Image (cartoon, grey):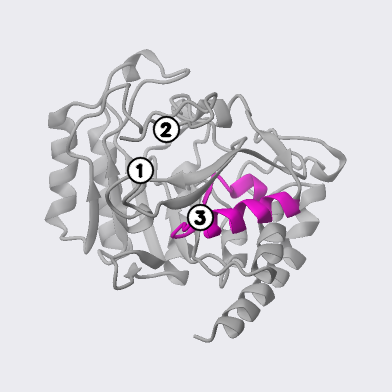
Amino acid sequence: MDKQFFIKRKLEAIERALDRLSPQASSCCLCPRLCRVNRLSGQVGVCQTADQARVSTSLLHYGEEPVLSGSGGPGRAPGSGTIFFAGCNLKCLFCQNYQLSWLNQGEPVSDEQLADFMLNLQAQGALNINLVSPTHVILPVLRALRIAYGQGLNIPVVYNSNGYESIEVIEKLRGIIDIYLPDLKYMSSELSKKYSAAPDYFEQAHLAIEEMYCQQPELILNSEDIATRGLIIRHLALPGHTEDSLEIIDWIARNLSTSVGLSLMSQYHPCFRAPAELQREISRQEYQKVMDRALSYNFSYLFLQPETFGSEEHLLPDFGQRIPFRWK
């Protein structure tokens, strides 16, 4: 596709989305929490965010799925151009990024500054712009993308989400998001209520993910095995809740397709307010059971973490540090 035509299409889609979504800022219903606060006047709801985005850090990330980060780590892989937003609309008790999701550590940025982050990451060789927890800041993200595309942004945009989305918002992102990277955390409403105060999590997430699948039904890689568009669904296996993980894998295979990407994570580590029953890592046996179920479906793109992780691993960030990850 001609690059100018590509940019024109993106900008048109962004304008349509902003026209339809911007009025919601005065009575916010951009996510299933439906807080109805006036974010334009500085009010905040569950996400603790008003009209401006707050950013903790932007960096080249080497620990995402290889089709997003490249392979080999710092100095060898190009990296995913990742922007970590402060605040969150879900707030899981065990969140490893609790410094951002719960403690809201980050600095407010203008739309122009956010666009500069994107362009600077592209200039550093980033394979994509990876927006981490964009749900509650979708309006400033869209405004920043409008600026960045006008100034030469031309790499894929990744929507890296907790999955607790409004389908009405996701519908408006058609033609804007190249790669959807949602979590599908829970099938059980009992678990989602207990750990994320969201008994309707699966009810909302499965509708949003189905819409993501409609927009990007197949994971497409370029000649260097880097994703250019598509859907990768992540699931973090929790200790003691293997059956819920198996039900999620079954649902993806039977209701979507095995041509989507599936990333099964074993990196759970007790963090923040994790309750007593989650005060351990997942066992090898538990993860093996989850992995075997996924393998039985022959997913075209299956990303696995068969090795256990320790607290010293780069997958457990400290956003109080200038470089939050311990890259090897």
* Residue indicated by mark 1: 63
Name the residue: 26% across, 59% down.
Answer: 253
Task: Identify which amino acid the numbered label 3 is placed on.
Answer: Gln
Whether label 1 touches label 2, CB < 8 Å? yes
Residue 174 point in image, percent of width and height: 56, 70
Q: Is residue 165 above or below residue 173?
A: above
* Mark before the other along the chain sequence, 1 or 2: 1
Badge 1: residue crowd in 10 Å (few <14, some 14–19, many ≥20)? many
* Mark before the other along the chain sequence, 3 or 2: 3
Task: Identify which amino acid the numbered label 2 is placed on.
Answer: Phe
Measured in 3D between alpha carbons, the distance from the residue under mark 3 to the one under mark 2, in whole angstroms, is 18 Å
Name the residue: 38% across, 40% down.
Answer: 186
Residue 74: assigned label: none
Residue 325: assigned label: 2
Residue 259 point in image, percent of width and height: 27, 67
Region rendered in magenta:
111-138
Q: Is residue 117 magenta?
A: yes
Q: Nearer the viewer, mark 3 or mark 2?
A: 3
* Residue indicated by mark 3: 124
Residue 238 point in image, percent of width and height: 30, 31
